[in-house]
Image (cartoon, rainbow, N blue to C red):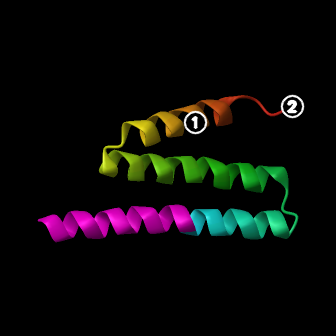
Amino acid sequence: MRRVATVVRVDEARAVIDRLERIDVLERDGAPPAALLEELRGLVRDAEAWARLERDERAAAAVERCDAALAQPVA
């Protein structure tokens, strides 16, 4: 059972890293803000899943703050 949990954690971590790489490419290519915002929202979802698996309270709190910030209207 331990190995399965470790593989899942690695998968969640990889999802966060992949999302960060996509955001970097979008930013470098001058993507429209809406595309970046969508990826950022996805990043928060991926990070939340990872934080839950890790049961890290600080990480979970940081994800909640990011989620709240992204929920604010963009001017």
> Could you tell me if the residues under marks 1 and 2 are in contact, i.e. CB atoms within 8 Å?
no
Q: Residue at x 51, y 33 (%)?
A: 64
Regarding mark 1 in the picture, which secondary structure is present there?
helix
Screen quadrant of the C terminus? top right
In the rendered image, residue 56 lying in the magenta stretch gets the answer: no
Residue 49 tag number? none
Regarding mark 2 in the picture, which secondary structure is present there?
loop
Residue segment shown in magenta = 1-17
The residue identified by callout 1 is 67
Residue 75 tag number? 2
On the rendered structure, is 70 left or right of 47?
right
In this view, 21 is above or below 70? below
Q: Position of residue 54 (x, y in %)?
A: 32, 50
Sequence order check, earlier mark of 1 and 2: 1
Q: Main secondary structure of the magenta part?
A: helix
Amino acid on which the number 1 mark rests in the picture: Asp
Amino acid on which the number 2 mark rests in the picture: Ala
Extreme residue in the left direction: 1
Extreme residue in the front direction: 58
Q: Residue at x 31, y 44 (%)?
A: 55
On the rendered structure, is 47 left or right of 20?
left
On the rendered structure, is 65 left or right of 13?
right
Q: Position of residue 9 (x, y in %)?
A: 33, 62
In the rendered image, residue 4 lying in the magenta stretch gets the answer: yes
The crowd level at tag 1 (other Cα within 10 Å; few <14, some 14-19, many 20+) is some
The crowd level at tag 2 (other Cα within 10 Å; few <14, some 14-19, many 20+) is few
Q: CA distance from mark 1 to mark 2?
A: 17 Å
On the rendered structure, is 72 left or right of 28?
left
Q: Quadrant of residue 18?
A: bottom right
Q: Position of residue 28 (x, y in %)?
A: 83, 68
Q: Quadrant of residue 26?
A: bottom right
Screen quadrant of the N terminus? bottom left
